[in-house]
Amino acid sequence: RRGAAIEMTETEKAIQEVDVYGFTILESVLSRDDADAMRESLIECMAEHGTDSNHRGTAGHVANLPVMDKVFWPTIDHPRTLPILEHFLGTNLILGSLNSRIVRPGDGLQGLHSDIPESMLNMASPVMMNTVWMLDEFTEEIGATRVIPGTHRSGMGQPPEGLELKHVVTALAPAGSVLVFNGQTWHGGGANNGDRNRHALFGHYRKHMLVFQLDPHDEFPPEWYDDLNDRQKQLLRMQNGAGALHAADAHFR
């Protein structure tokens, strides 16, 4: 009837918010137990494989998590995030990488930026979407991610010098929540002024014609292959096996 509110599903609402603002936040996608298990594994991975990142700001960094622990796999094709990503990238999208950025006490602001090169910016259809999986409660004190609404349509890869940023949103949400955003949206980690690390996973999804940021075929344990579900194999381009060539790699070798 005229004037009645339109009831939208969570996915429809999220898609609308990404269209308008460039991002959305889904709360409590992971249970607290699952978020805790991923954080504990990430702490171990950081101790064994971690490096220091200096990409527009300092932080701890762990790369290519799908080959390190199966505990991270539910994020690859989670039913609350994947439909949003498929809407913007198509159902033949790939997981370009699943990494982690650990903001430690004393790590400062990360410079605001787009994750897509300026030559690939596309106002009609992004080539990349990102997910930030919050394994701790995201607070301003420990460096929650900042996003700038509407910048996915700016046509610029970063803020121009001298621009006063009047509208900055800090992604505050409970552990287990996910920030989903258009890769063109300006974003950056916050400064950690607290007394504990801020742990988060970063899933970068790309249109099918692009190559991986980090190839999950590298060092993927062959004995794990049968534990992947069919959709995960598609997103990792592993339908033909963990060691088999896939189209992009075969083309660029």
Image (cartoon, rainbow, N blue to C red):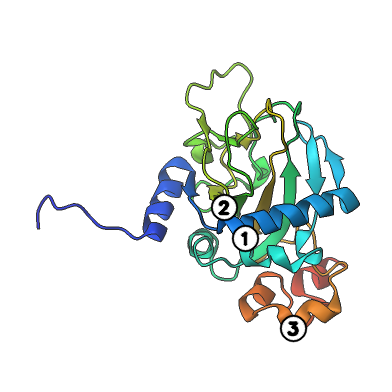
Number of the front mark, 1 or 3: 1
What residue is disc 1 on? 34
Q: Which of marks 1 and 3 is nearer the N terminus?
A: 1
Q: What crowding class fits label 2: few (fewer than 14 Cα within 10 Å), some (14-19), or many (20 or more)?
A: many
In the depicted view, which residue is nearer to us: 142 or 117?
Answer: 142
- Residue 228, located in which quarter of the rendered image? bottom right
Picture coordinates of residue 95, whole percent (x, y): 67, 63
Q: What crowding class fits label 3: few (fewer than 14 Cα within 10 Å), some (14-19), or many (20 or more)?
A: few
What numbered label is drawn on residue 176?
2
Disc 3 from disc 2: Cα separation:
27 Å
Circle 2 SS class? loop
Question: Residue flagged by tag 1: what amino acid is it?
Answer: Asp
The answer, for residue 243, to whether it is visible in the render is: no
What residue is disc 3 on? 226
Which part of the image, by quadrant, shows the C terminus? bottom right
As drawn, is 13 to the left or to the right of 248?
left
Do labels 1 and 2 touch, CB within 8 Å? yes
- Residue 232, located in which quarter of the rendered image? bottom right
- Residue 160, located in which quarter of the rendered image? top right
Do labels 3 and 2 touch, CB within 8 Å? no
Q: What crowding class fits label 1: few (fewer than 14 Cα within 10 Å), some (14-19), or many (20 or more)?
A: some
Disc 1 from disc 2: Cα separation:
8 Å
Residue in view at x 61 percent, y 28 percent: 141
Q: Which of marks 3 and 2 is nearer the N terminus?
A: 2
